């Protein structure tokens, strides 16, 4: 199977295939216990940490250190035009996504290389005191922030669909919405991550994105378009969403993934209930492109069976 062409004779957007095929979103979020993002205006290449006006040596080294610590690193910029900062501080956000240790810190730094002092293992553990001790300029942020992927150098869908969404959101939630360089899952564009929850969302509209922000303020999530919470493995994401769908539970920290073994995932509620969720993987049928310009292939898609009530571990 080859990629279909649009009316101009070019390969169609990968997000169009995804919508037409009704590809399920659960289990497609990135996997990371924490997030660190830094404002970097100016142009972004496909690999923005080393292909932007951020110092490439620092960008590559810090990105590698974040991956080693199970922390996601990315670049952000404010909506609209993207001139270089001209001495203005770079906004930084640091988030822990673990239930019970979910928090968001922010600061303005004169030089992004100040992030080298950040205790990334403490970010992974959700150790708020250790993180702030390592970079004392960080302070607690009470409102959630939304990162919307807009990097057209990475994938055309993110620019075509992400930028109009950011423009619409910035008018109703100023200061809470940022362009992001790469969130993964281009075919679900427009895509976004909500911090500090670490929930990732796809096929967003302005209305559904506002609903996600409002739910985040209440400590809740929205099931429509939910790809998963980055805290969990991809199987864990699928299972958690299956339990939320079954029970209607929207409180972010009400559920935890407490075990995985041989195609089953255990999801526990803070009230003592638990569910065993069977999770299977199957090749996509028909094949579809993972991102714009790539050939379709039979990627693996996760599916959750019906959650079975049981005793919490």
Image (tube, rainbow, N blue to C red):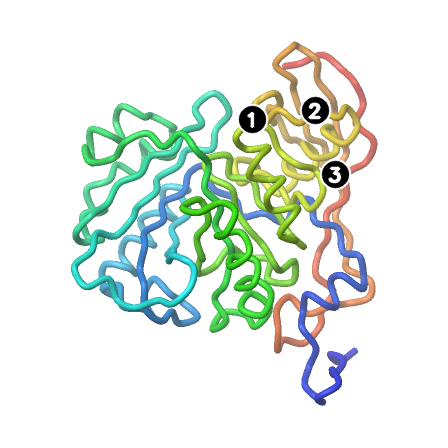
Spatial separation of the CA atoms under disc 3 and disc 2: 20 Å
Name the residue nearer the viewer: 66 or 244.
244
246 left or right, relative to 178:
right
Which residue is painted at 29% across and 48% down in the image?
91
Report helix, strand or loop for mark 2: loop
Which residue is painted at 61% across and 78% down in the image?
293
Q: Which residue in the structure is indicated by mark 3?
A: 279
Q: Earlier in the sequence, mark 3 or mark 1?
A: 1
Q: Which residue in the structure is indicated by mark 1?
A: 218
Q: Which image quarter holds the N terminus?
A: bottom right
Q: Quadrant of residue 129?
A: top left
Which residue is painted at 79% across and 28% down in the image?
246
Q: State whether residue 185 is above or below residue 253.
A: below
Name the residue nearer the viewer: 253 or 80.
80
Mark 3–mark 2 CB contact (< 8 Å): no
Name the residue nearer the viewer: 285 or 12.
12
- Please tell me how crowded label 1 is: few (under 14), some (14-19), or many (20+) other residues with Cα within 10 Å: some
Q: Which residue in the structure is indicated by mark 2?
A: 249
């Amino acid at each position: 199977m080859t990629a279909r062409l649009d009316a101009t004779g070019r390969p169609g957007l990968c997000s169009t295939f995804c919508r037409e095929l009704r590809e399920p979103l659960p289990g497609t979020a990135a996997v990371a216990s924490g997030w660190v993002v830094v404002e970097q205006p100016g142009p972004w290449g496909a690999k923005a940490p080393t292909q932007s006006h951020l110092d490439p040596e620092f960008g590559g080294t810090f990105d590698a250190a974040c991956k080693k610590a199970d922390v996601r690193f990315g670049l952000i910029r404010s909506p609209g035009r993207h001139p270089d900062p001209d001495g203005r501080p770079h906004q930084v956000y640091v988030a822990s996504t673990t239930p019970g240790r979910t928090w968001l810190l922010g600061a303005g730094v004169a030089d992004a290389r100040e992030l080298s002092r950040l205790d990334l293992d403490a970010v992974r553990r959700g150790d708020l005191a250790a993180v702030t001790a390592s970079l004392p300029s960080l302070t607690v942020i009470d409102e959630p922030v939304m990162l919307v992927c807009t990097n057209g150098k990475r994938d055309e869908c993110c620019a075509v669909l992400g930028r109009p969404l950011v423009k619409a959101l910035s008018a109703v939630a100023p200061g809470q919405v940022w362009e992001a360089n790469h969130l993964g899952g281009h075919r679900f564009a427009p895509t976004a991550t909500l911090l500090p929850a670490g929930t990732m969302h796809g096929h967003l509209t302005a209305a559904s994105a506002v609903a996600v922000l409002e739910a985040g303020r209440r400590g809740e999530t929205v099931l429509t378009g939910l790809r998963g919470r980055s805290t969990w493995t991809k199987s864990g994401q699928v299972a958690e969403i299956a339990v939320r769908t079954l029970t209607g539970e929207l409180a972010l920290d009400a559920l935890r993934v407490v075990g995985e073994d041989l195609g089953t995932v255990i999801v526990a509620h803070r009230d003592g209930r638990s569910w065993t969720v069977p999770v299977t993987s199957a090749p996509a049928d028909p094949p579809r492109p993972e991102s714009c310009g790539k050939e379709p292939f039979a990627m693996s898609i996760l599916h959750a069976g019906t959650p079975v009530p049981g005793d919490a571990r």
